[in-house]
């Protein structure tokens, strides 16, 4: 039985060099749960993954606001290092955090959270290579497959996606 997320609108941020599984696995799981999934890019219609797989954005970040979504996923790969350079991305993450919306970050996605200054006092996990970055941004780090701290859900790597998505989807349901 799938978790029903009818009426929930979720944004997935994309930029070049995104980690394939960390975009597509959540995308299909959310569609399966009947959520409305919006691919949000930075400044162009199409992006290529680390392995060259294309994805087309539905909209650019300058045309969305936190009020339009119940949740946000920040996938990893090298895309987060590009995403965090866009003030509109940082603004969206800060607004979603301020509104208590569910935010999920996988792997290097923690870089965007650090740049948005939403990690202070939170307990999170991430890819081990950015552990120092999330700690220096004020978070407590735990090395486990998924960590939920309130409306923030974090995971380490693609192998953690099943636990990440179960927890992310449960956080969305808990918001009812």
Image: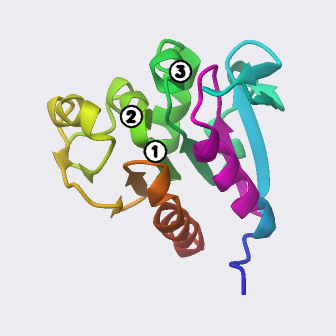
In front: 36, or 56? 56
Q: Secondary structure at mark 1?
A: strand
Q: In this figure, which residue is indicated by the disc labeled 2?
A: 113
Real-space Cα separation, disc 1 to disc 2, in angstroms: 8 Å
Q: Secondary structure at mark 2?
A: helix
* Residue shown at 22% from the left, 55% from the top: 143
- Quadrant location of the N terminus in the rendered image: bottom right
If you read the primary sequence from the N terminus, does the residue marked by circle 1 or circle 2 appear first? Answer: 1
* Residue at the extreme front: 51
- Tell me the magenta residue range: 6-30
Front label number (1 vs 2):
1
Q: In this figure, which residue is indicated by the disc labeled 3?
A: 83
* Residue shown at 49% from the left, 50% from the top: 158
Q: Secondary structure at mark 3?
A: helix
In front: 130, or 172? 130
**Residue 105: numbered disc:** 1
Eyeballing the image, is 54 above or below 158?
A: above
Real-space Cα separation, disc 3 to disc 1, in angstroms: 13 Å
Indicate the position of residue 83 as horizontal and vertical percent values: 53, 20
């Amino acid at each position: 039985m799938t978790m029903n997320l009818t009426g929930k609108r979720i944004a997935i941020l994309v930029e070049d060099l995104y980690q394939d599984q960390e975009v597509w696995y959540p995308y299909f799981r959310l569609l399966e749960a009947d959520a409305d999934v919006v691919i949000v890019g930075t400044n162009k219609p199409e992006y290529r993954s680390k392995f060259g797989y294309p994805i087309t954005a539905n909209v650019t970040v300058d045309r969305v606001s936190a009020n339009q979504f119940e949740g946000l996923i920040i996938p990893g790969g090298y895309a987060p290092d590009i995403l965090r350079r866009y003030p509109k991305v940082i603004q969206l993450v800060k607004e979603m955090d301020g509104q208590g919306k569910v935010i999920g970050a996988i792997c290097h996605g923690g870089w965007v959270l650090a740049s948005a200054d939403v990690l202070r006092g939170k307990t999170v996990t991430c890819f081990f290579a950015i552990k120092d970055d999330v700690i220096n941004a004020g978070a407590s780090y735990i090395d486990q497959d998924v960590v939920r701290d309130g409306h923030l859900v974090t995971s380490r790597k693609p192998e953690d996606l099943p636990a990440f998505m179960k927890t992310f989807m449960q956080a969305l349901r808990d918001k009812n």
